[in-house]
């Protein structure tokens, strides 16, 4: 399976079609064969990653506080516990600020937090995208790139 297909499974619910075949020959005379197939649902651990809006507020003479409401749904059967590291990138493809947040997303639950960054005053108008890196006991993945519209 390619890494693109594996990445697809992080973000999209799907079904696995499983086919099993077992063939035996007893004493080189009696053949025996069993076949079965079934479908198994797969829940994406990072389903519907979203940043909804951006808030910029004064912080100091040189910085503004940028708040990004971040959420996803853990549709999987396992806990997602760990950290996310985020970077804000400007229109010149430069990293302007970083932040880290803890993740605790039990199976079949939603997760949301506000990602907060201190950004130089002059850079606040040229923010382009957020890069998100996940580091949990189950997976390490990134960056997930989300444009700031």
Image (spheres, rainbow, N blue to C red):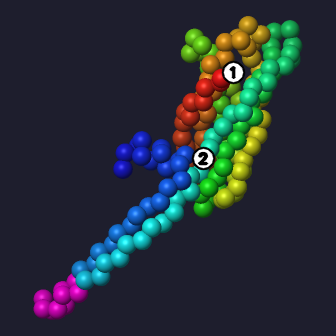
How many numbered discs sit on the rendered protein? Answer: 2
Q: What is the distance, in whole Å, between disc 2 and disc 1 at their CAs?
A: 23 Å
Does residue 125 show up?
A: yes
The residue range painted magenta reads 24-32
**Position of residue 15 measured from the top left corner of the image (x, y, whole percent):** 47, 60
- Principal secondary structure, stretch drawn in magenta: strand
- Quadrant of the image occupied by residue 144: top right
Q: Is residue 101 found inside the magenta-colored segment of the image?
A: no
User: What residue did someone put label 2 on?
Assistant: 46
Question: Please, which residue is most extreme toward the left here?
Answer: 29
Tell which circle, 2 or 1, labels the residue nearer the N-terminal end.
Answer: 2
- Residue 125, compared with residue 108, is above or below; it is above
Bin the neighbour count of mark 2 within 10 Å (Cα to Cα): few under 14, some 14-19, many 20 and up: many
Give the residue displayed 18% in from the left and 87% down from the top: 31
Q: Indicate the secondary structure of the residue bearing disc 2.
A: loop
Q: In this rendering, would 107 be left or right of 68?
A: left
- Percent position (x, y) of residue 92? 57, 11
- Taking the spot 65% from the left edge, 24% from the top edge, the residue there is 148
Mark 1 highlights which residue? 97
Check if residue 29 falls in the magenta segment: yes
Q: Position of residue 58 (x, y in %)?
A: 86, 16
* Residue pictured at 44% horizontal, 61% vertical: 16
User: Looking at the rendering, which quadrant does residue 48 occupy?
Assistant: top right
**Residue under the point 61% across and 26% down:** 147
Residue 26 rendering spot, x and y as whole percentages: 19, 90
Q: Are there few (<14), some (14-19), or many (20+) residues within 10 Å of tag 1?
A: some
Label 1 sits on a secondary structure element that is strand
Tag 2–tag 1 contact (CB < 8 Å): no
């Amino acid at each position: 399976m390619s890494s693109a297909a594996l990445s697809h499974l992080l973000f999209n619910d799907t079904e696995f079609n499983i086919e099993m075949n077992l063939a035996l020959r007893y004493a080189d005379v009696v053949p025996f064969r069993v076949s079965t197939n079934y479908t198994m649902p797969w829940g994406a651990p990072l389903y519907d990653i979203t940043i909804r809006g951006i808030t910029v507020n004064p912080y100091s003479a040189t910085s503004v506080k940028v708040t990004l409401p971040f959420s996803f749904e853990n549709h999987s059967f396992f806990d997602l516990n760990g950290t996310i590291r985020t970077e804000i990138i400007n229109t010149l493809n430069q990293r302007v600020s970083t932040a880290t947040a803890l993740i605790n997303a039990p199976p079949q639950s939603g997760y949301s937090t506000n990602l907060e960054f201190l950004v130089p005053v002059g850079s606040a108008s040229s923010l382009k995208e957020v890069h998100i890196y996940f580091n949990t006991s189950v997976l390490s993945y990134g960056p997930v790139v989300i444009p700031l519209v």
